[in-house]
Image (cartoon, rainbow, N blue to C red):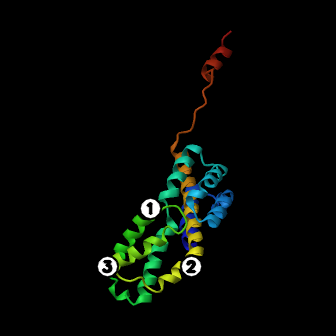
Amino acid sequence: VMLHYWVTLMGFLYLALRTSPLQAMKACWPAQVFAFCSASSAATLPVTLQCGEQAHVPSSVGSFILTMGATLNMNGTSIYFPCAVVYLAVSTGDEAKFTVVSYILLALLSTMSAAAAAPVPSAALVLVLPMFNAVCGTTNAPTPANFSYLLAMDFLLDRFRTWLNVSGDLVGAQCVAAMEKQAMPPRRVSSSTDPEEGDSSLSSP
């Protein structure tokens, strides 16, 4: 989670803004703190919109990107799924069932399930077991005993996931705002008097 935040997200933010990403994210810390405490991207959305305005994101961009990101952009959740499934496979001795196809399937399921997960606390936890059974090719298998460890740690892990999800929304909104600003042509200020006409009027008797 921290590696994705400090390397990937901050790298994209630097490439888009060409300035210090820490300075750009300075106005976003209230949304990050609220996301960590509430563990819900939907509950954090009003604070996220306010932080987007303070980060100089236009309301036309922020209202669309941040609202859509609260339900679809789940970076932390997509990282959590492979870690949880591989942990269960190793702890139960099913790692031998994992092939290259299994890892590709796990990556696809993690991406799609992260976008489908509800922005509420512990929504990703209920999708871990179906994903584990799908990747391992087992049906009606008993719940692994080590799943209780994931259940116990989810109170803390869910907060880090939500913190990363909201941070990704704010980074994406700032990147889109920067690209929109670069794509827009500079606004030309029209003057009532043409300089050439003004010179001719001064030269005439």
Amino acid type at circle 1 is Ala
Amino acid type at circle 2 is Met
Badge 2 vs badge 1, beta-carbon distance below 8 Å: no
| Residue that mark 2 sits on | 153
Residue 54 showing in the rendered view: yes
Q: Image quadrant for the C terminus?
A: top right
Rendering coords of residue 135 (x, y %): 35, 77
Residue name at image x 56 percent, y 73 percent = 3
Q: Residues within 10 Å of mark 2 (few under 14, many from 20)?
A: few
Rendering coords of residue 177 (x, y %): 56, 49
Amino acid type at circle 3 is Thr
Residue name at image x 48 percent, y 72 percent = 125
Rendering coords of residue 35 (x, y %): 62, 63
136 w.r.t. 203: above or below: below
| Residue that mark 3 sits on | 139
- Looking at the image, the residue that sits furthest to the bottom is 93
Which quadrant of the view contains residue 9?
Answer: bottom right
Q: Mark 2: which secondary structure?
A: helix
Q: Is residue 145 left or right of residue 195?
A: left
Which of 144/181 is in front? 144
| Residue that mark 1 sits on | 115
Residue name at image x 57 percent, y 49 percent = 62
Q: Residues within 10 Å of mark 1 (few under 14, many from 20)?
A: some
Q: Mark 3: which secondary structure?
A: loop
Nearer to us: label 2 or label 3: 3
Q: CA distance from mark 1 to mark 3?
A: 24 Å
Q: Earlier in the sequence, mark 2 or mark 3?
A: 3
196 w.r.t. 175: above or below: above
Residue 15 showing in the rendered view: no
